[in-house]
Structures are given as C-alpha cells and as structure tokens.
Amino acid sequence: MIYLHVPFCRSFCTYCDFYSELCKDGGDLARYAEGIGEEVSSRSGEIFRNVSAPDAVNTFYIGGGTPSVLPLAILERLVRLVGDAVSGQEPPSGDGSASGGRPVSGTRFEEFTIEVNPEDIVEKGLDYVKGLLGLGVNRVSMGVQSFDDGILRWMNRRHDSARAVEAFRILRTAGVGNISLDLIFGLGQLSDRMWEKTLDKALELRPEHISAYQLSIEEGSALGELARKGRYSEASEQQCRRQYDTLCRRLSDAGFHHYEVSNFALPGREARHNAAYWRRVPYVGLGPGAHSLSPDGVRSWNSDSLSGWTRSSETLGPEEIRLERIMLPLRTSEGLPSMELRTLADPSIVDRLIEEAALAESEGRIHIPENRFFVSDEIIRELV
C-alpha cells in the first residue's frame, strides 16, 4: 500500500501541528512535484515489491495537508508517477515532468482515497471531482470537523456548514459512492447539544464512513499556544466521555460498524488502507514528512521540506514490535488471537482484565469491548 503526503494548505487550523506549508504559488507546487518524481524514481523497486508481495494490500492514499488544493494537472502527474512504479514501468523523463499525452497508468487500486477540503470542492466544482474519478479515485475523505459555524470559525476552517453540505452534494452528483467525513468532539466550548446537531447533519447526509476524533492539544499548534496563555479551557473528561458515548450510540443506531476506536463504517465500507496500518502491513510513504514500514521491520521517515527531502530510518527492536503487536490490533473491534495476546503479555493480567470486563474473549480472539474503547489507552498500558 502506498501513501502520498501533500504538504500544502490554504490556511492552518487552530488545532493542527502536522507539517504543512501555505500554498502560495506554482513554483512551490513544481518543486514538490519534481521532488516526488525523484523519490519515486529512487524507490521504484521498493514500491513495486510492496504492491507485488503475496499478501500486499492494493491501496493508494493521498493525504495531507490538503490534497484538494492541487490542480488536476499536478495530481495527474503524481498519480502517473506512482502508477508507473506500481506497474514496474520507468517514467519517460526520469522525473515524470513530460506527460507526452500519455494516459494515467492502467494500474487500478482496489481502494484509492484522497482527502479534500469542502471549500475546495465547492470552488472547483463538479468537473474537478469528475477529474479525480478519472484518475482512479474511488473514495473521498472530507474534513468537515463540525456542522456548527461558530466552531468552524474558531477552528479557522475555510468552510461553513452550508458549504460542507454543498460539497457533499457535489461529490455525490459527480458519482463518488464512498465518502468519509471527519468530525471532532471534546472541545471545551462544544456543548452536548451542539455535538448532537453535528451528528444529526452527518447522519442526514448518510456517508459510508465517519471518523471522529477527540480534540487534543498539540504543543506546536495555535491551540497549544492559546492553552499555554490560559486562553483555552479543555473539555472535562466527563464531557469528552459523554460525547464519545453519544457518538457510539447514534452511529450504532444508524447501522454503522464501530470497527476501530475512532472509525465507523456502513457494513463493507471499512477503510482498507487504514485497517492495514493496524495490522502492521508494510507500506511505502512518499513526500515530505511521510513515514514507511518495510517488511523486515524498518521504519523510515522523510524530512519536512518542499524539495530535496532526506530519509531517516530505524530498525524496530523486539520490545517495540511487541508493543505495536498489542496496541494496534486492540484499537480495533477484531482484537487479536487469544493465544497471541497471552504470549505477548502477562497471561495473568489478560485474565484479570477479562474478569473486569475491560477485555472480552470470544471465538479464540480477545478485544476491547466498545463500552471500554474510551479508556482503551489505559487498558493497553496495563498489558504492555
């Protein structure tokens, strides 16, 4: 599976500390695209081996940042570069800068996701979305975060509630049949009633997938600075728990499968790409700030730079691998095989947590029950 990071945004959200750059001019985009071409060329063998392995997950995810700030021409160039590497082909000009009128590679990913901002979809319109579908995109993840205009302004989002709804309508009209919405709860100023209304609107739209995250204060974000200066009060644990419980109840009633702590899907619409991360499937990350995991347990990451980014790596030790083999699957509703968990962790602790109903065991597997997902970190800490 392949991840491509697009480090551009039109503005920075209050809560975000991910690496990103303001999208200022075409020169930045050109340098970035050339850098991707160079990286794909140098890692083409790794990319091909990743997707051609017997147990490979054939997915492609373009995330950010805000990938939807990119023009279709740039996206086409990037998709062609990756598609050629996946197919074992060499780009015609080394960096892929000359398309020569060639069509995008015939490689078809079973799941091809791109992240979008609602405002970009409304501004660029139906033809832009149809262009994405023409590149092979078959799943769109849209960062709505809230349907409350006051909350959206505080987050420094570019859209309002009405534009988010309009963007969803455009995606559907263009033919996007698999849409995921991102939502955020647990803000100090987000009342339970405001959260209910956001869920009302999300469920009214009926996306195939919803990801909902509790707000966290990251040190490098604008929110971190507000909190440091005493200008932001965190939501209480009780408030966050109420809103998470409301989320679980409402989405369950609407037919969504709660398959990971923060992720809900209609049956059969679980995100294959993200689910593979939780199973520790090897993946190739391209672009500045992107991470990768090789089959032999080497984790690597790219530096934060629009061009000439460098790559660093480390080999995970036995203890680090053990921790990941416990932590990642226990974030999911499937959990992991009973014998495997009892081998990785102290069996007496496993049995005690089962007796306390912090873990559940059935059909040879152990998982964290949904009513304990909110405190999953504490449960996992006891095991590791």
Image (spheres, rainbow, N blue to C red):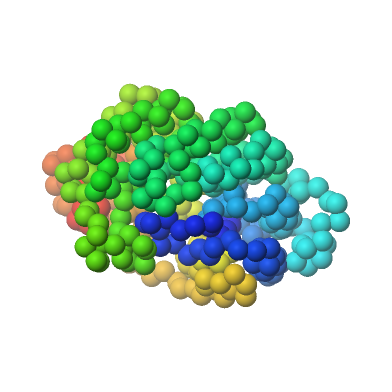
Residue in front for this viewpoint, 355 or 80: 80
Horizontal side, residue 356 vs residue 216: left or right: left
The residue located at (23%, 44%) in the rendering is 240
Q: Is residue 40 something that shows in the picture?
A: no
Horizontal and vertical percent for residue 153?
Answer: 39, 48
In this view, the residue in front, 276 or 351, is: 276
**Residue 19 to residue 206: above or below:** below
Image coordinates for residue 314, horizontal then vertical, percent: 46, 73
- Whether residue 188 is visible, yes or no, is yes
Q: Quadrant of the C terminus?
A: bottom left
Q: Residue at x 54, y 56 (%)?
A: 10
Q: Which residue sits at x=25%, y=52%?
A: 377
Residue sitting nearer the eye, 234 or 83 = 234
Left or right: where 118 falls relative to 260:
right
Along the viewing direction, whichever of 298 and 243 lies nearer the viewer: 243
Against 149, is 88 above or below? below
Q: What residue appears at the point 42 percent right and 52 percent down from the top-left corner?
A: 156
Please state the horizontal and vertical placement of residue 134, each as a whole percent of the image.
72, 40
Displayed quadrant of residue 175? top right
Image location (x, y in percent) of residue 316? 41, 69
Q: Residue furthest right?
A: 100
The quadrant where residue 34 appears: bottom right
